[in-house]
Structure formats: structure tokens, C-alpha cells
Amino acid sequence: MQLTGPEILRRMQLKTNQKPDIIIVPFNEKCLGSNSYDLHLSDTLKVYKHTLPKGMKPAIEYKGNRDKHSMRDWFKSYFYYIYYLYCKQKFDIINPKFLIDPCDEESHETIDIKIPETGLILSPNIGYLGSTVEYTETRNLFPYIDGKSSVGRNFILNHHTAGRGDDGFCGTWTLEIKTLYPTILYPNMRIGQIYYDTFIGERKPYNLNKESHYNGQIAPTAAALIPIEKTR
């Protein structure tokens, strides 16, 4: 059963063992909807260093006028732009040299990108790790996030698969952001919604699980290495 907006607010005030079931910081009641709470994008993104072609920028600072931008803006210098025109296969993300190995630490080295107040143009060829401004804690409930309708209608994917949280999770939410077109994102823009469901069964809180990787995370967090399980 999904919580309504008024029930979310009640659970934020209802203390269980000295803490409420839901904590959202910062909180603004104007962001409380019929059955969700709006989440906002923080001002930092991360990209996997290994996925960036040499000489290309991971994003472009928006100049306030789309007519001022061109394909040339994606490159750090005119030399790399000309190199791209003659050797496009070296910049193609399907080139295996840009592969990500989920079980290798080197694949998960990141660089930070600040989103300026004027906005940042994201590339549809790059995956970005963002995070919510809001820090949340959830107890006795199942939290999950999804995109707002207007976010989806701008073809912004704010989570690739990991929109589901856990009872007991504490932290900001890392977002796996992908766009269909070159798209401008702004710091503190509404990027999604958080929902809460009730569940059946005894609790196994995420923050008490030794196998959990991301509890307490603040800011965009790169993937933990996926272990290779041995079979008998």
C-alpha cells in the first residue's frame, strides 16, 4: 500500500524508537504531492573517467542561447574537433576501448563536474551519476524514486535501474542520469519523486546489513564492485 502525501507528513512526525519513520532534509511542504515528495538535483555530477574519449568534454556549460552552441563545443580544442571529423570511430561509445567492467576497480574511477547556475548541457552519449539535494532516512517502509512527469517528457532518465531503496536506508540518492538529446540540467531543479510503500514481514534494515554498500552515502557515489560468485 502506497502512502499518501498527508500520511508521509504524519510519518515524519510519528516517532518510533526516538526517530520518525521518514526523515527528509531539507523539507519543504510545497514539494509534498498527493502520494510523493519532490526531489531536487544537487550541483555535482560524476562520470566514469574511462568512458570519456580523449579530447572530449563530459558536458558543456550552457551559454543561455542555443544558437551559440555547436558540435565544436564538445571538444577541448579545435585540433580534437578536426581529429573527430576524420576519425569518428575513435570517439564512438560502442568502441570496446570505452568498456566498463563491473568487477574492475579501474572502470569506476570518476571525475567531478559542477553544474553552474546557468545550466549544463549533457550528452546523450554519456552516463552521469548525480545525487539528490535531499538526505533521507526511512524506517518501517519501502522507499523508491521515479521521474516526475515533466522530467520524463523531456526524455531525462533519472535512474537507470536503481530506483528502489530499502527499509533502513540513510543518505542522499545517487541518480544514474541519461538523456535522449543534448539536454540542459540546472542545480536544484526538480529531478524526481520519492514514494513510500508498506511491506509485509519482519524487518531486515539496510543500515544494519553488513552486505550493504551505499548506506550513509552523500553526493554521487560510484558503483561498488560486483563480486564474481563461484559456483559449485
Image (spheres, rainbow, N blue to C red):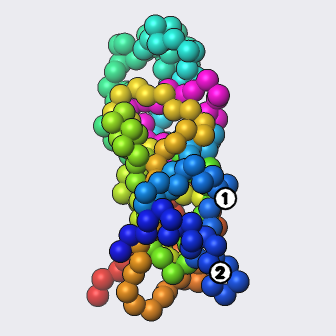
Three-letter amino acid code of the residue under disc 1: Val
Q: Which residue is mark 2?
A: 15
Indicate the amino acid at tag 2.
Answer: Lys
Left or right, 56 with respect to 90, comes to right
Q: Residue at x 62, y 62 (%)?
A: 24
**Magenta stretch holds residue 204:** no
At a point 43% along the width and 57% down the height, the residue shown is 34
Residue carrying label 1: 25
Q: Quadrant of the N terminus?
A: bottom left
Mark 1 closeness class: few <14, some 14–19, many ≥20 residues within 10 Å:
few
Residue 172 seen in the current view:
yes
Q: Is residue 219 visible?
A: no
> Residue 173, position in %: x, y?
54, 57
Q: Quadrant of residue 115?
A: top right
Residue 4 location in percent, x, y?
44, 65
Residue segment shown in magenta: 110-129
